[in-house]
Image (spheres, coloured by chain):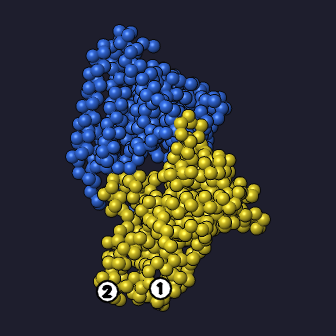
Amino acid sequence: MTRILTMRKALSEAFFQVMEEDPSVIMMGEDIAGGQGAPGEQDAWGGDLGITKGLIGRFGPSRVLDTPISETAYIGAAVGAATAGLRPIAELMFVDFMGVCFDQLLNQAAKFRYMFGGKTRTPLVIRTQIGAGFRAGAQHSQALYPLFAHIPGLKCVIPSTAYDAKGLMIASVRDDDPVVFFEHKVMYDRISDHVPERPYEVPLGEANLVLEGEDVTIIAVGRMVHMAVEAAGNLAKQGISCEVIDPRTISPLDEDTILDSVRSTGRCVVVDEAYPRCGFAADIAALIAEKAFGALRAPVRKVTPPHTPIPFAPNLEDTWLPSPERIIETVSSVVGYRR
Amino acid sequence: MQLERPTLLEAYRLMAVIRAFEERVSAEFAKGKIPGFVHLYAGQEACAVGVCMHLSDRDFIGSTHRGHGHCIAKGSDVTSMMLELFGKQGGICGGKGGSMHLADFDKGIMGANSIVGAAVPLALGAALAAKTKGTDHVAVAFCGDGGSNQGGVLESLNLASVWKLPVVFAFEDNGYAETTASAWAVAGGAIANRAAAFGMPGELVDGFDFFAVHEAAGRAVARARAGAGPTLLHLRTGRFFGHHEGDSQTYRGPGEVAELRRNHDCLKLFHTRVTEAGLLEGSALDELVHQAGELVENAVRLAEAAPLPPHHTVHENVYVSY
């Protein structure tokens, strides 16, 4: 039977299930319950967008921990707890805030297993919101996952469906390496699809073939997958057949699925919400140039925001973001390319 | 010290403008006219005004996500601020900053800052520049009770003492960091107590009382100007609105905000004190409130009518060659 859930509900269900099955899973973050030490309602917010609501009621304040605004201290505590036998899920409210606590991931969590010769593991999930579209300005809207993908030792997960969000979250919590799990704030309530009730895993490092096609491969993650599918629908009416691939995790990266597709279509467009320089799209383009050059019938093209901070005014932010129109334009230029 | 009549009038005017601005922003936000996140300063006016009245345009402040009051107290143009909040052309940051990132360097405002505690190290840098250039300018780092727990803020307290910088740390403790009570989240009883650990004077001040803030800030700024180093002010205050607009505030106690508005309204307290002492007439104060309302009304009217920022500005004011 088909059971349709939003990405919000799918993630919430994953948290309840992983915490139920494993008492070593704890959760921490700012206002993930809310009202700590205050006279009024407890669990007042359940996280700044309500994603972790209800967990404290089921699992209690010793497993669902609100923190002061001290990211360096509590992300560090989560890393330490992971090396000491727990499986913490720590919420960094917005990925933009990583600037105040980066060292605990960059030089600590990511390095331990390698640097200590395999003598420890760091089963940690950092959950964090990404993405533009909320009119939240330059410091609350970024899609900074390439920064993390650059660091060996970290796994980077970017779900695009409710089904994937649940399965990838469960796989991330059960994984023995530190995982950074990027949740697009615009998608929590806008995206809904079939989500089985039982716990299940979507393996880290396996791309999803979203749409089969013949003329062009479109690679996209997160919210961009939906724009790519919309563009592909329009292009189909013009007789252009697009294959859409969602890597789902950009580290580890399922290179084979990407390369097999490009070898069959001979053309590729990468759609990404991250900044263009040294980003995910550039990385995919480099991968294809390196490993599938002989198959290319046109240059690999990128659809990304401009290399600028994210503007606040709604019309400017909309201009800044990639769009189905820009994807259509770019795909058409690739298909029409002549040497 | 008895304040002169023009100083008293200016203090009340600024507090009234901040109050009118914030009450109106709340209403416009509810109508959907203001995009994004908005954090209102109403209730805390005595803090911003009591501190900033000691500063010139050449003195710097670092602000917070709750920064409208600081900007007005430091002299920013109310219309330019409103345009910015509306995301319109002519906004103080050209529509690229918004409420949480209002900056006005001509007025010495290094910016509202939506990263909690992040402006504190920036203010330290401004103080270092003043000291290096040999001026007597000072910097004030505004920070909330939530920010007082940030590692970078504690590092800044230390460095300011080590370098003996002309900086004032103004911690506005409005009782809550988002939903979380400062009584729970700030260990050690009071932020003021932390000053001793970093070798600087610390004062616990009634942040609802303009005169108490003004006197304490006067001592702190004078100390900084004289080259005697940093001071920590712990201003106990309260906010009339939620963490942000849209916050249902269910974490607050019943009747808490009504009680604040009734008994701890810094404008009412000021009004009572100066009229009972015969320093100013109630009519003069009421006229200032009326003018503040008109000023804000005009700002909203202009913001509504203003054009959107042109699309090409997406690419402006940033180094980009491709």
Q: Residue A198 carries which label?
A: none
Residue indicated by mark 1: A262
- Judge whether B125 appears above or below B96 on screen: above
Q: Residue at x 40, y 55 (%)?
A: A134
Residue B25: where, in percent of width, then height?
A: 33, 39
Residue type at mark 2: give it: Gly
- Judge whether B272 appears above or below A90 on screen: above
Q: Residue at x 59, y 43 (%)?
A: A68
Residue indicated by mark 2: A239
Q: Is residue B37 left or right of residue B80?
A: right
Badge nearest the viewer, 1 or 2: 2
Numbered disc 1: secondary structure: helix
The picture's colour for chain B is blue
Residue B164: where, in percent of width, then height?
A: 59, 33
Q: Split into 4 quadrants, where in the image is the N terminus of chain B?
A: top left
Residue type at mark 1: give it: Val
Cβ atoms under marks 1 and 2 closer than 8 Å: no
Tell me if residue B224 can be seen: no
The image quadrant of residue B76 is top left
Residue A185: where, in percent of width, then height?
A: 46, 58
Between A112 and B200, which is closer to the camera in this rendering? A112
Chain designation of label 1: A
